[in-house]
Image (spheres, grey):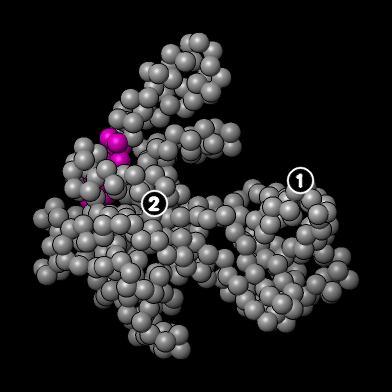
């Protein structure tokens, strides 16, 4: 099960620098001119989780395997992208393929790095991209909706399901609002219909404020303005200095802590970004543990036990019988599986059990 966060933003806001640090590679060229990122670059990164080491130590595991999330560095967008300006069509096609949007906003001054709009204004930058995405969605829906209405009038079952969602989305877009406003409290079947429309503004958004190195610990006035905007939208924000993160990524692990402390940071911005991306997609982690390995697995919130088993192998889901389940705190406090069993904290859960974040699970199944 792969989950992708697309890194988007105007040219020269630090997207590629951030991506390089995320993946610890230089595969995405960072340069001082628009469209230096021509093809989307994808990198998988481990989701930081201190629970893995705790579980592995108790289980005596030889190997530790974290769960992972993908980040996609997408070409910079400019005003008019919805009409094909710049690399607009390619940008819009690439962003349709991701599950969530990490929107990088420039919150630093630097005369040596040009800004495509000629001024540093992250709120205006956010509005530029949001507007282009909404215009693209509006155009897409308006081209499709009449045909769907005709089919619905003929009692076509698929059209009857699609039409209410399309009309709700159109109403929002014509009111200048992104389609993700429909996500609040949406039923699973309606979410499936909405996702099938592949609308750009239906994806959840996280704003990343790229600040100068001396603002990495506390942010600045520009990042504070972004945080206020995000709060009004019900979105999240992370403050990061991409320049610092790129430096950290080049250091040996044993030197990174000292470098962070020197810059007044308790943890890297990338750790916070990765976890924020994980949270943005409403994902949770469960674990399997034994002498061979301790491994983290990713599932969506609300996933039932058979679905979680299917992440390991489809046979596990198909032949699911039950799942021995131990809560993380019980596993740690009781020092492992055997003591948890003796204390009655190892539960046998059936097909309707909803997996909780931190569960340590052992699946029983028929092949």
Residue 235 in view (yes/no): no
**Label 2 neighbourhood size at 10 Å, few (<14), some (14-19), many (20+)?**
many
Q: In this view, does 124 lie above or below 333?
A: above
At which x and y percent is residue 193? 52, 32
Q: What stretch is highlighted in magenta?
A: 124-136
Number of labels in the image equals: 2
At which x and y percent is residue 185? 54, 37
Q: In this view, does 40 lie above or below 30?
A: above
Residue at label 2?
101
Label 2 to label 1: alpha-carbon separation: 32 Å
Q: Nearer the viewer, residue 95 or 222?
A: 95
Residue sitting at 10 percent across and 55 percent down?
118
Q: Which of 184 and 351 is in front in this view?
A: 351
Q: Is residue 35 left or right of residue 201?
A: left
**Label 1 neighbourhood size at 10 Å, few (<14), some (14-19), many (20+)?**
few
Q: Is residue 276 above or below residue 353?
A: below
Residue at label 1?
352
Residue sitting at 19 percent across and 54 percent down?
121
Q: In this view, does 78 lie to the left or right of 267?
A: left
Q: In which quarter of the image is the C terminus?
A: bottom right
Q: Is the magenta stretch mostly helix, strand or loop?
A: helix
Q: Residue 306 carries which label?
A: none
Q: In which quarter of the image is residue 72?
A: bottom left
- Let me know if residue 199 is in the magenta part: no
Q: Quadrant of residue 1?
A: bottom right
Label 1: which secondary element: loop
Residue sitting at 40 percent across and 37 percent down?
199
Residue 345 in view (yes/no): yes
Q: Quadrant of residue 174?
A: top left
């Amino acid at each position: 099960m792969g989950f992708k966060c697309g890194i988007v933003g105007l040219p020269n806001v630090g997207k590629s620098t951030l991506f390089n640090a995320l993946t610890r590679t230089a595969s995405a060229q960072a340069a001082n001119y628009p469209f230096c990122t021509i093809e989307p670059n994808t990198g998988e990164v481990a989701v930081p989780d201190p629970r893995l080491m705790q579980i592995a130590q108790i289980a005596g595991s030889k190997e530790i395997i974290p769960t992972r999330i993908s980040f996609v560095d997408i070409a910079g967008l400019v005003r008019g992208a919805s009409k094909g300006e710049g690399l607009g069509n390619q940008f819009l096609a690439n962003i349709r393929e991701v599950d969530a949007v990490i929107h990088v906003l420039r919150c630093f001054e630097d005369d040596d790095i040009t800004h495509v709009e000629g001024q540093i204004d992250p709120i205006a930058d956010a509005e530029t991209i949001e507007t282009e995405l909404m215009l693209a969605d509006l155009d897409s829906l308006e081209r499709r909706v009449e045909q769907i209405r005709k089919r619905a009038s003929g009692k076509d079952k698929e059209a009857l399901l699609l039409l209410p969602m399309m009309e709700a989305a159109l109403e929002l877009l014509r009111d200048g609002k992104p389609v993700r406003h429909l996500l609040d409290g949406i039923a699973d079947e309606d979410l499936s219909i909405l996702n099938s429309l592949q609308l750009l503004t239906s994806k959840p958004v996280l704003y990343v404020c790229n600040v100068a190195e001396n603002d990495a610990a506390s942010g600045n006035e520009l990042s504070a303005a972004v945080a206020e905007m995000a709060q009004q939208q019900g979105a999240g924000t992370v403050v990061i200095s991409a320049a610092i993160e790129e430096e950290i990524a080049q250091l040996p692990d044993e030197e990174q802590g000292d470098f962070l402390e020197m810059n007044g940071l308790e943890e890297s911005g990338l750790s916070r970004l990765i976890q924020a991306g994980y949270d943005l997609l409403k994902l949770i982690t469960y674990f399997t543990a034994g002498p061979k390995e301790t491994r983290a697995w990713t599932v969506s919130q609300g996933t039932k036990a058979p679905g979680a088993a299917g992440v390991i192998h489809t046979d596990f889901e198909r032949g699911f019988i039950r799942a021995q389940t131990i809560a993380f705190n019980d596993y740690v406090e009781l020092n492992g599986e055997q003591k948890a069993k003796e204390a009655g904290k190892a539960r046998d859960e059936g097909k309707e059990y909803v997996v909780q974040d931190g569960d340590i699970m052992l699946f029983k199944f028929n092949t």
